[in-house]
Image (cartoon, rainbow, N blue to C red):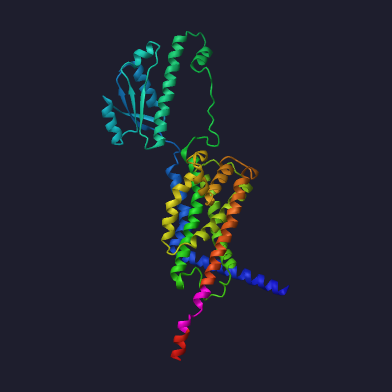
Amino acid sequence: MSTFLNRLREHFTDVLYICRQELLQVIKDEGVLMFLVVVPLGYPLLYSWIYNNESLHETPVVVVDQSHSALSRQFINDCDASPDVQVKYYASDLDEARSLVSRQLVRGVYLIPSDFATRVNRGEQATVSVYCDMSLMLAYKAVYQTAMVEAGRLGAGMSIKRAGNYTKREDAITAQPLAVDDVAMFNPSGGYGSCVLPAVLMLILQQALALGIGMAAGTARERHRNGQLVPDNDPHYRGAYRIVWGKALCYGMIGAVAAAYLSMAVPAMFSFPQLGTGWPLFWTLLPYTLASVFFGLTVSCLIRYRENVMLLMVFVSVPLLFLTGVSWPQSSIPGYWQGVSWIFPSTFGVRAFIRVNSMGASVSQVLPELRILWIQAAVYLGLACLVYRHQFRLMKKWAQPSTAELASEAATQ
């Protein structure tokens, strides 16, 4: 029993020693410190400030009014009075309007044909052509939806005039026979930031851990003899499990602080939807942080030079955001790419976090995602241990002198 306790005490001593050494390396290495501390602190603030307005307002448009009627001027004034569109220019023809769009002076064109008022007054269907700059989807949404809303209001007003009603209730029914209540679930403002940024916050956590762990591993390879991940002259580095758990303890503590900051502090600063309570958030972030740490340790074993991890993780950042199913519907992602997305903890971590934090889901409602995160954590833990065990085999091989070296040494003696 005493032997077992001594071995257990020795195991914990080595784990804590390795954790301490890893923390010292993080503090001394400016690159690792930047990815593990500065990036989780600064990037969320930068992205959140950029999208703080949630939606575009006063989007500039140009009007080509070929009707020059009171009705066309009413339509133009209504569009200009809306919060999302600003009529900034008037053009004589469509070619002039296109030149303004090509110079990025406006984001859309409203073309009112010459027979606009005539057709409306005859009770016929009139047409307003809307041309949008599709390079920015938010601008397209503002320009197009404003035209649709104001055209509907104008048409309702004309219907009321022709109906010959006697009461305001009859006018309301004529203008809107079918009432529709538009409720933006889980995103009251209908903003882009509240929709996408919670996913970006969780992706930043994974990428920051992977970048920091990978850069630290690249530094270790450059420093140690024969490109090893661990020093060969330190008695505390004497087991793959001890090394993996020591490093995981170090980066897990850093990841826990970053996860709390990204999941609670940043959304509170910028008033993102927060419906999740403490325990569901905890049980969501725990497996996700562990899976991200062990994923980073596994990936770091492939990094020979510290710069390589930046090229790898930055390259996959945008595809990983698409694969989460936030910026592009999950049902529209091909099956092959959905299979690729299972490799990364961010896929299920982002989905679980959004459902818990933005939609108020309980732990039982995100159990499939949490199970997969725990499986990923276990798989990447095993892979990291296998890689470090392989490192020990290489260390023993390099430590044994070759036959030629022994012969040379004997001849010298």
In the displayed orientation, state which residue is furthest to the right: 1
* Residue 282 covered by magenta stretch: no
Above-or-below relation of 57 to 324: above
In the displayed orientation, state which residue is furthest to the bottom: 413
Counting the numbered discs, the total is 0
Left or right of 393 in this view: 148: left
Residue 240 in sight in this render: yes
Residue 405 placement (x, y as % from top left): 46, 83
Range covered by the magenta-colored residues: 395-405
| Quadrant placement of the N terminus | bottom right
Residue 399 placement (x, y as % from top left): 51, 77
Residue 163 placement (x, y as % from top left): 47, 9
Residue at 72%, 74% in the rendered image: 2
Residue 178 placement (x, y as % from top left): 53, 19
Above-or-below relation of 70 to 304: above
* Residue in the foreground of this view, choosing between 143 and 334: 334
Left or right of 300 in this view: 3: right
Chief secondary structure of the magenta portion:
helix
Residue 84 in sight in this render: no
* Residue in the foreground of this view, choosing between 215 and 232: 232
Residue at 48%, 84% in the rendered image: 406
Quarter holding residue 354 = top right
